[in-house]
Structure formats: structure tokens, C-alpha cells
Image: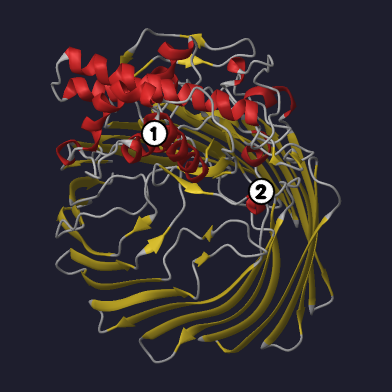
Amino acid sequence: MSVGGGEREIFIGSFTHSNHFNNRVGYKISGQYYRGIDWNSYDDYEPDSIRLYRPTPYGPVYESEVIENNRDFDIEKISGEARVDYLINPDLSIVANGGINSSSDIELTGVGAAQAVDWTYYFGQVRMNWKNLFAQVYLNASDAGDTYILRTGQRVIDKSRFWSGQIQHNIKAGDKIDFVYGFDSFFTRPNTEYTINGRNEDKDNSNEYGIYLQAEVKLTHKLKFIEATRLDLHSRLDGLIFSPRSAVTYQPDDNNNFRLTYNRAYSTPSNTNFYLDMLQADDPFEIGAALEPFIGFNPGIDVRIQGVPESGFHWSVNSSGPQFRSSFAPLDPRGLGEDDFIDFNDPVFVNVMWATGRDMVIAGFTDILADFGFPSSTIDSLTNSIRAVSPETVSGVNNALMTFDLSTGSFEPTSIDQLTDIDPLEPSYTNTFEFGYKGMMAERLKVAVDLYYTRRNNFISFPIIESPNVFLDQATLEDYLANEFGLTLSDSANIEHLNVLIMLDQPQYGGNGNGTPVDELTNIFSYGTAQIPFGTVTPIEAYDPEDILVTFRNFGNVSLYGLDLSINFDLDRNWSLGGNYSYISRNIFKKSESRIHDIFLNSPRNKAAVYVQYKNERTSFGSHTRGRYIDAFDMYSPFEGTRVNSYFIIDQHLMYSVAHNTRLILTVKNIFNNKHIEFIGAPKLGRLTILRLVHSF
């Protein structure tokens, strides 16, 4: 049993007990309780207030009134596990075990952070060994409790199940060849009640089946050859998946081992890649509430994540360019709906954009004047004159494409050439050649070295924004407005308006002082209206045609090589030291002709650790000091930012036996309190000290 506590109000309690009834039945039970307070962190895309709701096929069902959206940084976890072993006879044994883990904390997900409330995982397993035959079945299950997404207030319901069954047998063919062969199956049964897989809820089951054969051949008493082959079938993918493996091992003596291997592994797209359907950000541009007073409805554009359907995603393109859909479509005089495609640079809809943007700019300008304390008479005069001289329609104005970047919260220019269809997902293959050594290079020196070269095909992306938004093109709008304002204000009929608007040219109000307000009016309207996303280029298969699509795709082939090194040296019977080092040649692959997006491995190129350990059984004292260095790296995530800075931290672990079977254990992580983040979206971590008392009966 153990009990402990430490900084950040941590309390830990745990126990483990095992025994046997007779020589045939044994059991083991264990449990743990943990609570504490997490380091604070925040997400700018989380609103100050939310309403908790559940999505349904008929629309959202709200479960609360508007509430404050405050993160709860309290952590609480409880877990338990039990196991029974039954030795029926010397050749036959059965093992059954199961466990449960419930936690409440903040979980980082692909759609933002979730406030996990009593999220529970549990598992069960039964396995059997009979002579050379092994078989097992197991279940992993989940219940998300009262969890919800902090960005949107959406409830997360996850009552999914994952079943697996496996059988394996091995036989010997003479003294030199061993065969191992088997069959396994996996059955994924999501049950999210439309909260995670949404409109895919009734078609998101998947089955996987695999068979394999491995032969180990003893060429000599020092040299072995291993060949393995595996075939897999996935219910959502076409054809068989072939995975070979070859290895040669050479062991010249008991202390040294060399190996040379080739392995072709595969990774099938996950259930999430296929079937995810969730709101990721609710009107992140805040145009819905801002424009509703002017147009009578909410035209907010949401960010939604959708798995790739069996047909893939296809853009609608004609001679004008990519077609788009718009939440402003009801304003179109042709009676368009939000499902209707609109031509790029369509002059009718360009004027829908202009009219809406014009009214919003004028209203915003009025608010700015009021904030600066101008008299209402001056505000009314300026507003009336601006409205009078600004054109009600425009011509020769084009559209522009820009893609929203969640990591920076800004729009980036997008080329039409960047729009490529998203094919149905395929497995990702990893081909790896590896040379390894493990052994004793001296009496007290242990060394392990791995050198590898890896090539990965059909990389499956992290969730990426694929839909660009459609704006008014600022350059062509500037050209038109400069000419139009110049003509209008040169007309003697507008001399009174010119006399009012000349105030905008004055330097104290931000003008350039060139004697005319044409430049200022052009800048105000061309910039202001060009900041509003009026439409979204979405594929034909998108569930939400006017919203930004976030999804997955196979793209690009990447190659890299790396090194893993581990060293351990025993100075004497009490002292030892060692460390490890890992290196990869590349951790980011920039987009190119074969890669439509950047590929981030979300890991550093260099990482290393060193340790010094002391253990004295006579004094019952032990110490383990470990330093860890992580190189800076870029990563992709659904949170703001892409850079994880390098950091070096030192951990200290002390153990002392205070009495028979009783130990005090002191752990200090990040002993010098080096504040750092280890993952984009995660909080800055500091020092954490925990003291535990452990007693064995």
C-alpha cells in the first residue's frame, strides 16, 4: 500500500494485493486514487460563455442555459484492476482480467480541448494457453460521462466498443525451423449518439481480419534467419494489405547480438479518419452576430471536421474557377439557397458581397467616431455623406481565395491550383531497414545502437483545413473605388459632401493631407469589405456546404534516417551512469508537387537523456538523477501556435527504507522549475514534488 502527496494539492493512494487459493488458482487486485490541480492553460477560440447541447439528426438539443465557460483545472482519477489465473493442468491454463479507469480533467482533442467529466474506460480479457496453442478475446470500452467540448459546448457521448479475437499456434520442423502462424480479428463498434461521428453514426462500424506466418531458421548456432508475412483485410478498404518482414541475427557470444532487418508495416486509416463529423469552432470570425442586425439572419461560418467518405471529396470547378457556397445566399436576388453553387467572380453575387460589406463598414465607422467622442451632429453628417457618395454597386471587381489558419488565427492567400480532390483514404505504408547492436562492450559497459532508414508512403495527414474562403479582391476593389470616388466627388452636385468628408484627409484623423478624401474613402471601404469571408469553397460531398471543411487525406512520400543510442556503465556495485540519444534526419517536409501540405512529424530531431544512479542496500538508500533535453521542433495541431521551444529539465528520485518493508520515496520533476511546454495546446509545466510512503505486508 502507498499514500502520498505534494505540490499542486496532489494526493495519491494505491494498493496491490495478490494471493492464491491453492496450487491452481491465483488472483491479483489493485487500485489507485489520484487528485491534484493542473497547470493553467487557455485557448483563445473558447468563448466566455456557452450552452451545453447535444447534436441530433433533427438539430441541437440544448441541455443548459448560457453558462460561464471556465476551465476546471482540478484532476481526479480512480482506477481498479483484477486478475484470476487458473492452472487446469500442466498443459492448460486460463487467465481472466479486467479493469476500469475513470477520470475528470482537461483532454486535448482534434477539435479543441474537452472538459472531461467522469470519462470512464474499462477492459476485459480472457486468454488460454494449451501446449503450443494460444487464444484470447478482449474488449476495450468507453463511457464519456458528462464530457463536453470547451470551444462549442457540445456534449461528447462515447459508448463505443472494440472487440478482438486472436488465435496463434507454433510448431517445430526438425531442430532448425520454428513456425508461428495465426489469425486475428478486430471489430470496432462506435456508439457516439451523433456527437462524434454525427451523421455517420449508422454506418461507422468496421471489421479487420489478418493472418500471418513466421519462420525462424537456425542457420548455425550463432546465425538466425527470420521471415514473416502478414495479410490483412479491412471492411472499408479495397484489396488485401501485404506486410512482409525479414531479419538476420548474429550472436557471436552470450554478451553480443547483431541484427539486420527489413520491415514493411502498414497503418490503416482510423475510425476517426473515416467517420468523424463534429463542429470544431463556432463562428470563429465572429461575423454571425456582427452582421445579423443588418441582414436579418445569422450568416456565421463555422469550422467543421468531417471524415473522408468512400467516394472521397471533389471540388466543383467550371471555366470561372472553383464554385463556392455561401451563408449569404439568401440575399441573392436569384433566390439561391445555401446548397447552391455560386460561380467564382460572379458579378451578381459580388454585388451582394459589396452591399453587405458597405453597410457593415459604414456602421463600424459610425461606432469608431462615437468611441472618439465626436458630437452626434458630426457623426450624422459624416455618415450621411459617406453613404451618399459610396456606390451601391460595383463592376470589374473580382473574388479572392484565402484559407484560415487555426494556428495563427489569420487568413493566408490561396492559389486556385492548390485545390485538389481528396481521394478515398488508403493505408499508409512504412518501409524500414534497420541495423542494430546490443551487448557488453566491456565488463561493465552496456551499449545498444540502432541505425535505420524509413520511407513512408501515403502519409495520412493530421486534420487540416481544406476549404478556402471567398472574399472581395482588395486590389480590383481599390481600383474601382478610387475611380468612382474621384468621379463622384469631382461632381459639383456633391460639393457639400466633399466639404464634409475633407475632414477624413486631415493628418490628425489619419489622413494623408493631399487635399482630397478619395484615398481615405477608398482605403476604408476596400480594406473593410475585403476582410469579410462571404463564401466557402466546399466539396460536393460536404455535409455542411457553407462551413469550412477540416478533413484528412493521403499525400506525399517521406524518407528519413535516424539513430538511437543507449549506454549504461556500472562504476561499482553502488554507482552507475548512462544515457540515451535519438536523432532523426528530418521532422518536417515542406509542401511540393507531390505534397499538397506540409508534413509535420510532431517530434524533435534531437533528444537526449543522462542519468546517475546510486543504490546502497546496506544503508537502504537510493538516488536516481536524470536530465532530459528536447530539441525545438515545429508541430501541427488544432491549437494556436506551431513551435515547441527546446528545453532541458532535471528530475530527482530518492528512496529510503525507514523500517522493515516501509519506504519513503521522494520524486521532484523539473527540479529547477524550468517552465516549458511539451505539446502545442498543453500548459506550461513547472516543478512538481511528490512524497510517498510505501509499505509491504
Q: Which mark is residue 419?
A: 2
Type of amino acid under label 2: Leu
> Secondary structure beneath disc 1?
helix
Q: Quadrant of residue 216?
A: bottom right
Can the viewer see residue 557 in this picture? Answer: yes
Residue 532 % position (x, y): 46, 32
Residue 132 % position (x, y): 75, 57
Q: Nearer the viewer, residue 396 or 284?
A: 396
Vertical placement of 345 versus 222: above or below? above
The residues tagged by marks 2 and 1 sit, at their Cα atoms, a distance apart of 27 Å
> Secondary structure beneath disc 2?
loop
Vertical placement of 328 versus 638: above or below? above
Image point (78%, 40%), residue name: 236
Q: Is residue 16 left or right of residue 134?
A: left
Type of amino acid under label 1: Gly
Residue 48 % position (x, y): 30, 23
Q: Is residue 495 left or right of residue 256?
A: left
Q: Nearer the viewer, residue 245 or 295?
A: 295
Q: Quadrant of residue 288?
A: top left
User: In terms of sequence position, does the residue under pointer 2 or pointer 1 come before the other?
Assistant: 2
Contact? badges 2 and 1 (CB < 8 Å): no
Residue 82 % position (x, y): 48, 35
Q: Which mark is residue 443?
A: none
Question: Which residue does the numbered mark 1 point to in the structure image?
Answer: 528
